[in-house]
Image: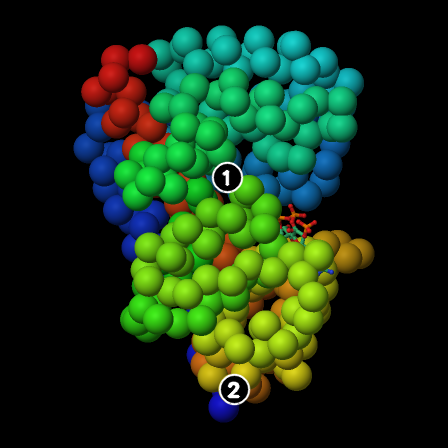
Amino acid sequence: MTAKIIYGKEVANKIKEEVKSKVLMLEKKPALTVILVGENAASKVYVNNKHKMCKKLGIKSDIVVLPEDTTQAFLLDLIKKLNNDKNISGILVQLPLPKHIAEEAVINTVHPLKDVDCFHPENIGLMFAGQPRFLPCTPAGVMEILKFTGVNLSGMNAVIIGRSNIVGKPQAILLLEKHATVTIVHSRTKNIASIVKNADLLVSAVGIKHFVRAEMVKEGVIVIDVGINRIKEKLYGDVDFDEVVKKASYLTPVPGGVGVMTIAVLMQNTLKAYELQQTHNI
Ligand code: NAP
């Protein structure tokens, strides 16, 4: 079997076109502020990609670059100012942050109605309860890719590698909603290979180049590779693409797979934040 390759671009285009046409109709435009603290090279690339996409869709975008030694108090004060700024629809603080800044404090300070990353506990809670306000960008992007395949997830054995708050945990909730039977494996899991071997659907978000090898997966598995591993300026996924492609039914490439979808959902969330702002008058 040779897998069908699912390119994020194909799936993202429809979402982006929808956002663009809605934004075009608006007199006042949605506005996203992205805060970047420090010199993380990968973060700079992600922030610039988000900025470019905003421009393409008619969304106002502002990048605030702060030095590595920015204090937590300064950052929280800036977020509070943006929370109260009626001209700002969405706020995104690019992670990871320098070690002296507590991510949790930052996430909890962003106004839940401007939380376009869907990291705030209030938004996570709403999603958990099946009443989502925003959807977390990467896991929701994965769900859009799966929808694109047309495959029915009900009853599938879905295995997620990784249990982060950003990818693994929310991914599990979204897959459960589609009636998959979900298993999350992580660094303390015993016998990962045997659990993965049982997967009808595998979502890998471990952050290790070629962690998923062909002998670990069963014939016909759907494989979504969330991993982005930057080695000497080259990007690799978590999946050994050249080998797994011979066994899977569907496979996403890195780059060109999930990453594109993450930005598309961010654009959707920014428009949603703008709409919420109108109804809540904030
Ligand atoms: P993370 O917070 O570092 O989480 C990694 C997870 O992998 C953790 O749950 C960890 O387990 C688990 N893990 C680490 N080593 C393992 C091992 N040897 N065996 C089994 N599990 C292991 O990372 P993340 O933020 O979720 O991101 C994961 C990957 O996705 C990264 O490559 C990141 O760059 C990428 N990513 C891509 C996008 C995109 O748009 N495509 C978005 C976000 C992230 P413990 O919890 O036990 O430590």
Q: Which residue is mark 2?
A: 219
Question: In the rendering, at what x and y percent does residue 52 appear?
Answer: 49, 39
The answer to which image quadrant residue 45 occupies is top right
Q: Is residue 35 above or below residue 41?
A: above
The answer to which image quadrant residue 63 occupies is top right
The residue shown at (65%, 10%) is: 74
Real-space Cα separation, disc 2 to disc 1, in angstroms: 36 Å
Q: Residue furthest front?
A: 190
The answer to which image quadrant residue 102 occupies is top right
Q: Amino acid at mark 1?
A: Lys
Determine which of the numbered discs, if any, sits on residue 147 in the image: none
The answer to whether residue 248 is seen in the rendering is: yes
Given residues 254 and 165, the one toward you in this image is: 165
Query: In the image, is the residue at mark 2 within 8 Å of ligand 1 by its beta carbon?
Result: no
Determine which of the numbered discs, if any, sits on residue 50 in the image: 1
User: Taking 16 as reference, is 163 left or right?
Assistant: right
The residue shown at (66%, 69%) is: 192
Q: Residue furthest bottom?
A: 1
How many residues crowd around disc 1 within 10 Å: few (fewer than 14), some, or many (20 or more)?
many
The answer to whether residue 62 is seen in the rendering is: no
Viewer-nearest of discs 2 and 1: 2
The local secondary structure at tag 2 comes to loop
Question: In the rendering, at what x and y percent does residue 254 appear?
Answer: 59, 63
User: Taking 61 as reference, is 211 left or right?
Assistant: right
Question: In the rendering, at what x and y percent does residue 111 appear?
Answer: 43, 19
